[in-house]
Amino acid sequence: MNDTLLSLGFYTLVLGVPLLVYLRKLRNRDRRAQEAVEKGKLYSEGPKAQHPQIDTMRCIGCQSCTEVCPEGDVLAMLGGKAVIVNGHKCIGHSLCADVCPVGAITMAMAGPSMGADMPYLTAEYETNVPNLFIAGELGGLALIKNAIHQGRQCIDTLVARLADQDRAPGVHDVVIIGAGPAGISASLRAIEAGLDYLTLERDEIGGTVAKYPRQKLVMTSPVEFPMYGKFKKRELSKEDLLAFWNQVLQRADFKVRTGERVDHLERRDDGIFHIATSQGQHHARAVVLALGRGGEPRKLGVKGEQLPKVMYRLIEADHYVNRKILVVGGGDSAIEAAMGLGRQQGNQVTLSYRKESFSRIKERNAQRIQEDIHSGKVRVLFNSSPVEIREDSVILDVQGESQELPNDYVWIFAGGTPPTAFLKKIGISFGMQDITLEASREARQAT
Ligand SMILES: Cc1cc2nc3c(=O)[nH]c(=O)nc-3n(C[C@H](O)[C@H](O)[C@H](O)COP(=O)(O)OP(=O)(O)OC[C@H]3O[C@@H](n4cnc5c(N)ncnc54)[C@H](O)[C@@H]3O)c2cc1C
């Protein structure tokens, strides 16, 4: 009898405890999903560019998609089905589509109204101007892996197209503009394919990646990298990623003209592109625009903004200690900068944001900034904006009242102005895209 009771107790323990843990986990997941749905209702915004499309007839409600998204709450479960609650947060990881066991998710670009500020592109990343391609974030799809894939794809399309055309003296096969991940990938593929290429970069090799804060952890996915093969790392520091690219570029004898900005380009009647830069003129049979969407940092237009203590990018937070600092903005970059600076010895950091709360930031940042506010590392002034920046202070309008704060440095993160005017000037149409992102699914399957 005792033995029977003992075995019963044993089995209850062995089977019952994991079952309880599992049920609790499910309940927590539901609660988190419900919270996400409610939050989504509060500030739900439609997708800006790429986003998942869910076939609700196929969805089995397994929650794999909601769990896997690195951006947090793009998707949530409602009535046992996955739904989009924060479409604007999707930046195209596509992991939800990858993990869905029943293939209920495909990635799509936003519709014509939502994608109105995106250039029109064919499935080969060609614009309405023949032989003028766009690769990388400029086309509306973020992430390094997408930039690398698209840079490679543009050149593959070109190789097939240019093969039976005659070369002309002084005319490159292709001019690649921008040396971020998309431009690097396009250039390496051009070298691999034996094209006469020219890469122009107004700044430095690496694009946006070179401007990440020091030691930033870069998340990426396995991707086929030209002149190297499959790059399998998923996480590495910015410095290690740049070192890897430099190594491959050196081995490939990559030639780039850095410090040369492209100001205008035009496809003439003979099909040749004339490219005007800050240094001169170039000619090409095809062009790949890999400009990114960073553009120029947006200025506030307040008095004193031209002072040298005002900056728009933070790379080395630990270079600033024992300082009085104002960070302006309410996006992820502003919050990350404020937290980075707030953690340095002796800094007094104030974050000024014109709205009454943060609304479009990553979940991770939303949690961490609350911790930093509570521990006094960062002070946040909502409903506030700078009115004037002086040598040793700043004047803020805080809910209609003027406040003067002692200040050594100001960082402004008001976004960038994407190169829309440049694209329009060179004749690129905007609006609905032909890319259904099936191309990117194919790429994932191929890599
Ligand atoms: C803070 C931050 C963190 C991020 N973290 C990640 C991450 O962890 N993982 C990830 O996958 N993605 C991340 N991203 C996104 C990723 O960096 C971008 O999607 C990617 O860099 C886009 O590559 P690109 O080549 O299209 O453009 P960019 O990297 O922006 O490069 C464009 C290049 O074009 C040059 N250029 C622009 N105009 C001209 C001109 N007129 N003439 C000549 N050259 C010009 C620019 O100087 C620049 O070098 C992050 C982005 C930011 C801002």
Image (tube, grey):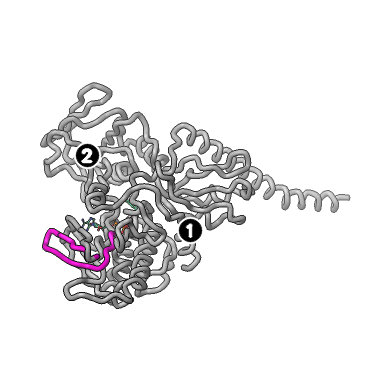
- At which x and y percent is residue 159? 34, 72
Q: Which mark is residue 384?
A: none
The residue lying at 77 percent from left, 52 percent from top is: 11
Instruction: Say whether residue 317 is visible.
Output: no
For the record, the magenta segment spans 271-289
Question: What's the amino acid at mark 2?
Answer: Ile
> Where in the image, quadrant-wise, is ligand 1 located?
bottom left
Q: Which residue is mark 2?
A: 325
The residue lying at 23 percent from left, 37 percent from top is: 326
Label 2 beta carbon less than 8 Å to ligand 1: no
**Residue placed furthest toward the right:** 1
Q: Is residue 280 magenta?
A: yes
Q: Which residue is mark 1?
A: 438
Instruction: Give the left or right position of residue 219, taking residue 314 as reference.
Output: right
- At which x and y percent is residue 437? 45, 56
The residue lying at 31 percent from left, 67 percent from top is: 186
Q: Nearer the viewer, residue 45 or 265?
A: 265
In the displayed structure, would residue 171 be above or below residue 36?
Answer: below
